[in-house]
Image: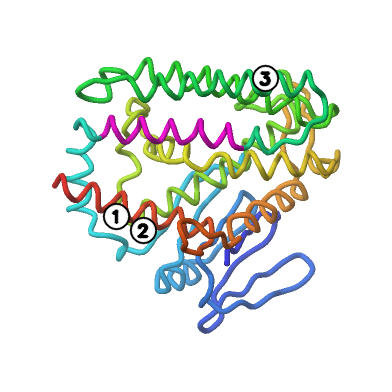
Amino acid sequence: MELILNTFGTSLSRENDGFLITYKDGRQRLPAIGIRSIQISRGAQITSDAVLLAIEHEIEIVFMDKTGNPVGRVWSPRYGSISTIRKGQLNFSFSKEALVWIKEVIRQKIENQQALLLMMHTQTPSLEQTRAKNISRLEDYRQKIAAIDGDIVSDVAARLRGWEGIASKIYFDTLNLFIPEEYRFESRSQHPATDAVNAFLNYGYGILYSRIEGALIKAGIDPYIGILHRDDYNRPVLIYDVIELYRIWVDYVVYKLAAQHAITEELYSVKEDGSYWLEALGRRVLIQSLNDYMEEVITTKGVSRSRLTQIQLYAQSLAQKFKKFE
């Protein structure tokens, strides 16, 4: 269970062995058992006793900004054998194997994009032709990435970033054609969003960043030691590498909301500078939709588990990979 406090004036305190949430209109009591994380946005409060209770139960506390991105985190000191894994992680980042790994991450990202585009229903021959052409273009870049070689990531990083960027533009340009016309956007926009769909995508990616960061920390991995993204000062750049495997989940959820015409004007606001931001109701709709999707149990290679569990298991496998380089 994810406990999300994003309403102004909400407070979280401790009551015996559980939490007490105080709203403007009432109170709610929750046992600590069963809660995996607590997410707090601006305007909400938490007491030190509640923080200590969360630490006792290994519940991560994440402080979020208005775009859904994590800006601070409190976690249990029992997470992972950090020193051993970090030494191996650093050695791994300068190895040939790191290049093999990041190439596979980007190739999988493009394959996910191709799969989502193939899911789109169309009875228009011209749109079908455009989709087929652009999926083929994505495959060209996937093959280029597979063929590129070097001794370490920095040897080919610029080309990888360039090809990944071009592939993403092709993908979003194509996806945009399948979104209801009233939601279509000129281009992918991030800081800030210049349309409602991009505002939903940005907030959704922020939620996903938080999930991945939490999984990496629990596995004992340092999120600040990246592979392809290595030059951003004081940023958890490894998350930017790993998230590429899972961005498609946010894309799918936001696409479904748009296809169902569920992105209504009360879910977002438009500022004087033309930027789009999710309102409290919009955040609740997206958080619930994305959480439901990530909690859904699916069968992969004969094993049934939730999508969120897949992230946690992947982080654990990545930690084991790093340990071999210690």
Left or right: where 223 falls relative to 266:
left
What amino acid is at disc 1? Gly
Q: Of helix, strand and loop, which one carries label 3?
A: loop
The image quadrant of residue 146 is top left
Contact between labelled residues 2 and 1, with CB atoms less than 8 Å apart: yes
Left or right: where 295 falls relative to 232:
right
Disc 2 packing (10 Å; few <14; some 14–19; many ≥20)? many
Q: Quarter of the image containing the N terminus?
A: bottom right
Is 263 rendered above or below residue 14? above
Check if residue 109 falls in the magenta segment.
yes
The image quadrant of residue 92 is top left
Task: Indicate the colouring scheme.
Answer: rainbow
Residue at point 64%, 78% (across, down):
29
Q: Which mark is residue 187?
A: 3
**Outermost residue to the bottom:** 16
Is 41 rendered above or below residue 26? above
Nearer the viewer's eye, disc 3 or disc 2? 3
Total residue callouts: 3
Q: CA distance from mark 3 to mark 2?
A: 36 Å
Disc 1 packing (10 Å; few <14; some 14–19; many ≥20)? many
Give the image location of residue 178, x and y in percent: 76, 30
Q: Of helix, strand and loop, which one carries label 1?
A: loop
Is 104 rendered above or below residue 37? above
Read off the magenta span. 98-115
Residue at point 61%, 25% (across, down):
171
Disc 3 packing (10 Å; few <14; some 14–19; many ≥20)? some
Residue at point 76%, 44% (across, down):
257
Q: Which mark is residue 220?
A: 1
The residue indicated by pointer 2 is 218
Q: CA distance from mark 1 to mark 2?
A: 5 Å
What amino acid is at disc 2? Lys
Query: Which of the marked residues, 3 or 2, is nearer the chain's N terminus?
Result: 3
